[in-house]
Image (cartoon, rainbow, N blue to C red):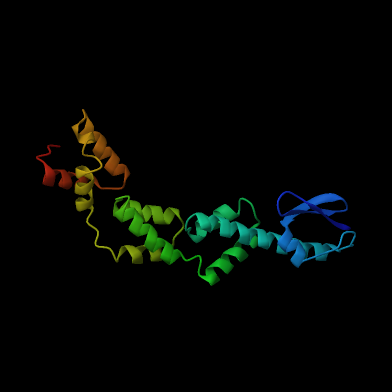
């Protein structure tokens, strides 16, 4: 196979084999792995180069994704697999774990704190959100065990703030109850919260 390259937009480099497009990389990678145009390369040499290209692409994609917000390992893997192969994705993930930029336990700590303190989710909803992000059950349970969870107090706070105006509308009470249940709160806790605030009659 005859190797050639073409300059693309920005710092992109398009690689051609036998004058047919094969893959795109960047100028830095091409300079570090320079092959002059017209060089004949074997299938093994090409596969080795392609593996390096895909790994670099996976690393760059990791950096881009994690620059936006923290992710669990599962979330990151799912996004990587949309653009890179599974082997390259796993190698990049392993590299980021080793470097300390990807840590499900730390991610879970921050997520649980955010969901409890900011979103005011119930304990069951928080656990569901952690599982949805692929965080190991053992990690999730350990982090949750460190919190003194009082769902009734959380509901009372929500009734006094977020849902206060809605309760004044026609049918507002039932709508608020339904919304709280969708957030993972048990009806028994919702009822207890209402009883502490008002003479709520079921």
Residue 15 shown left or right of residue 132 in the figure: right
Apparent side of residue 5 relative to residue 68 in the rendered image (left or right): right
Residue 137 lies, with reference to residue 82, above or below; the image says: below
Q: Which residue lies furthest to the left in this view?
A: 199
The percent coordinates of residue 91 (x first, y second) are 62, 65
> Can the viewer see residue 7?
yes
Asked if residue 51 shows in the view, the reply is no
Given the current orientation, which residue lies at the most extreme bottom position?
A: 98
Tell me: residue 90, above or below residue 118. Answer: below
Where 198 falls versus 56 (above or below)?
Answer: above
**Quadrant in which the N terminus appears:** bottom right
* Location of the C terminus (image quadrant): top left
Please give left or right for residue 82 compared with residue 199 in the image. Answer: right
Left or right of 61 in this view: 8: right
Q: Residue furthest top?
A: 170
Q: Viewer-proximal residue, 191 or 176? A: 176
Residue 99 percent across, percent down from the top left? 54, 71
- Total numbered labels: 0
Image location (x, y in percent) of residue 111 = 38, 58
Locate residue 170: give its quadrant.
top left
Q: Residue shown at 71%/54% (left/top)?
A: 11
The residue located at (34%, 51%) in the rendering is 125
Can you tell which quarter of the image residue 3 is in? bottom right
Give me the residue at 35% from left, 56% from top.
114
Residue 38: where, in percent of width, then height?
Answer: 90, 59
């Amino acid at each position: 196979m005859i190797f050639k390259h073409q300059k693309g937009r920005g710092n992109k480099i398009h690689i051609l084999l036998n004058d047919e497009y094969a893959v795109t990389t960047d100028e830095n990678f091409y300079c570090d792995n320079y092959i002059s145009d017209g060089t004949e390369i074997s299938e093994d040499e090409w596969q080795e180069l392609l593996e390096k290209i895909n790994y670099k692409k996976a690393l760059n994609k990791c950096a881009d994704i994690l620059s936006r917000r923290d992710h669990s390992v599962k979330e990151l893997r799912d996004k990587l697999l949309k653009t890179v192969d599974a082997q390259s994705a796993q190698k990049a993930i392993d590299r980021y774990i080793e470097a300390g930029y990807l840590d499900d336990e730390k991610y879970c700590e921050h997520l649980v704190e955010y969901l409890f303190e900011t979103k005011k989710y119930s304990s069951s909803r928080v656990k569901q959100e952690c599982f949805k992000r692929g965080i190991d059950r053992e990690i999730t349970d350990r982090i949750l065990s460190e919190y003194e969870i009082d769902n009734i107090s959380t509901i009372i706070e929500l009734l006094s703030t977020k849902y206060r105006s809605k309760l004044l509308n026609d049918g507002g009470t039932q709508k608020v109850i339904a919304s709280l249940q969708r957030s993972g709160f048990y009806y028994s806790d919702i009822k207890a919260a209402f009883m502490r605030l008002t003479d709520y009659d079921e």
